[in-house]
Image (tube, helix red, strand yellow):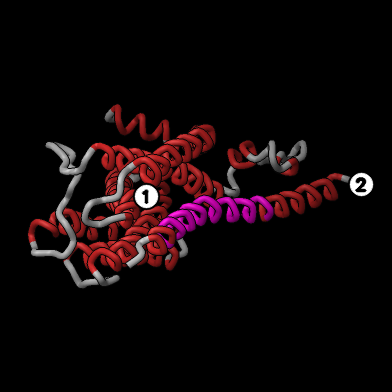
Amino acid sequence: MNPWPFVVASYAIFFLGLAADALVPGLRRRRLLARLDGRWRRERTRLSQRGSP
Amino acid sequence: MHPLVRWFHRFGSPPTFYRWAGAAQPWLFAAALLLGAVGLYFGLVVAPADYLQGESVRILYIHVPSAWMSLFAYLFVAVNAFVALVWRIRISEILAMAAVPIGAMFTAVTLASGALWGRPTWGTYWQWDARLTSELVLLFLYIGILALYHAIEDRRRAARAAGLLALVGVVNLPVIHYSVRWWSTLHQGESVKLFGESSMHSSMLWPLLLMAAATHIWFFASLAGRARLALLEADSDKAWVREALKQSLPDASPPHGASA
């Protein structure tokens, strides 16, 4: 049996696992920052409107 | 207060940990990638094929380090869960739960690469052998801990409940480790020993150890990122988060007269 397809598939799974492990928190962080940015922008607008005559 | 506990409290204060982990993470990732590249070069190019397994031995340079990581990550989760439960140290809760997905990933890679190694070597992808089955139980434990953690809304209660489950699951670690000695298994016994002489030739042992070092450093790099994210999510309404994100989000600094 030719072992190379099994070797290649194993390494592909290994690198996919590492890539997912590195990328998923990065994407979640971007989503969280976008959410916080929106929240703080709204808060800033509200506070500045309250301050104006 | 015990000096170790005091150090934990100081190091584990969210702003300090966030800053420290953020500075360390790129260096850790770079070291892991560099060591991994050297290890893979030696494992795939320099190391000879095995006289019995042939070229499929090359799978072991990722399978064995991943298997070690699956156990190491679980031990890390359990130790931090224990510290969090006994001393109520919040950063330990965060670290324990941040390590679970990384451990689950390495366990899944172990099982998949083991199956792909088993087909050309044993003639089968899977066997209900003690080592394989206990490793599968480890994956279920990781999934169970994650599911429990996300099922409870209160993050601190969720971490405590999931930490308790992690502590119960520790019983599986010696079963995995000693399964090849306690039972007659298809899976081979250990070739690399922490104490004593390994039965592996140095041309194969060194790439394996390099890959093991790379995956361990990767674990801490990934953990740093995940723990930082968990801290941001948990403390998003706290002043230190605004302070920490001031560089990337200009609206993070509150207008004059407003409290943070």
Is B131 placed above or below B68 here? below
Q: Is residue B138 visible?
A: yes
Task: Estimate how packed mark 1 is, as few (under 14), some (14 to 19) or many (20 or more) residues with alpha carbons within 10 Å.
Answer: many
- Where's residue A4, x and y in %? 39, 60
Looking at the rendering, in which quadrant would you find the N terminus of chain B? top left
What residue is rendered at 61% in x and 37% in y?
A: B244
Query: Does dot 2 land on a helix, a strand or a loop?
Result: loop
Q: How many marks?
A: 2
Lateral position of residue B252 relative to residue B227, left or right: right
Q: Is residue B77 visible?
A: no
Is B241 placed above or below B100 here? above
Lateral position of residue A47 relative to residue B42, left or right: right
Q: Quick one: A39 or B194, which is closer to the camera?
A: B194
> Which residue extends farthest right?
A53
Q: Quick one: A6 or B254, which is closer to the camera?
A: A6
Question: In the picture, residue A27 is in which quadrant?
Answer: bottom right
The circle on residue B96 is 1
What residue is rendered at 21% in x and 40% in y?
A: B201
- Where's residue A36, x and y in %? 67, 51
Q: Quick one: B130 or B50, which is closer to the camera?
A: B50
The kind of secondary structure the magenta stretch mainly shows is: helix
Q: Which residues are magenta?
A: A9-34
Q: Amino acid at mark 2?
A: Pro
Q: Is A22 colored magenta in this rendering?
A: yes
- Where's residue B111, x and y in %? 32, 63
Query: Does dot 1 land on a helix, a strand or a loop?
Result: helix
Task: Estimate how packed mark 2 is, as few (under 14), some (14 to 19) or many (20 or more) residues with alpha carbons within 10 Å.
Answer: few
Q: Amino acid at mark 1?
A: Ala
- Judging from the image, mark 1 belongs to the subunit labelled B
The circle on residue A53 is 2
What residue is rendered at 65% in x and 50% in y?
A: A33
